[in-house]
Amino acid sequence: FITSGTTLFGKHRAIKKYLKSENIQPEEMVYVGDETRDINAAKKAKVKAIAVTWGFNSREALSEYQPDALVEQPQELIEVINKF
């Protein structure tokens, strides 16, 4: 699923709510985001985090939060998702 929102805090709650509503286990989901707080939210929800470098935070900032994958180009995203 794809979602977007203006919520600054509580992203991990939104992830957990979606997991529960769709009866999905955390290991069956990956979360793609462009901010360090996206990585934190994914980790709190116990789902894999893929950080993309063409958004809000820099590659360096995203790397510091140790996402499960870091994607430089949009065309790489599907390949990386399929590895999970």
Image: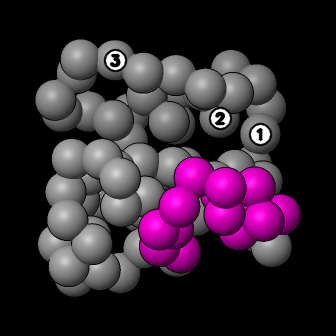
Asked if the residue at tag 1 contacts the one at tag 2, i.e. Cβ–Cβ closer than 8 Å, the answer is yes
Give the x, y percent position of residue 56: 21, 47
Distance Cα–Cα, label 2 vs label 1: 5 Å
The amino acid at mark 3 is Gly
Q: Label 3 neighbourhood size at 10 Å, few (<14), some (14-19), many (20+)?
A: few
Query: Mark 2 is on which residue type?
Result: Leu
* 44 in the magenta segment: no
**Is 79 a magenta residue?**
yes
| Closer-to-camera residue (71/41) | 71
- Secondary structure category for the residue under label 1: loop
> Mark 3 = which residue?
5
Q: Say which of marks 1 and 3 sits in front.
A: 3
Which mark's residue is nearer the viewer, 2 or 3? 3
Could you say which disc has been placed on residue 24 in the image?
Answer: 1
Seen in the picture, residue 76 relative to 31 is either above or below; the reply is below
The magenta segment: 69-82
- Residue 19 visible in image: yes
Left or right: residue 76 versus residue 46 is right
Q: Is residue 66 left or right of residue 46?
A: left
Q: Using the numbered discs, state the Cα–Cα distance from disc 2 to disc 3 in whole angstroms.
A: 17 Å
Residue to which mark 2 is pinned: 19
Q: Position of residue 50 (x, y in %)?
A: 51, 62
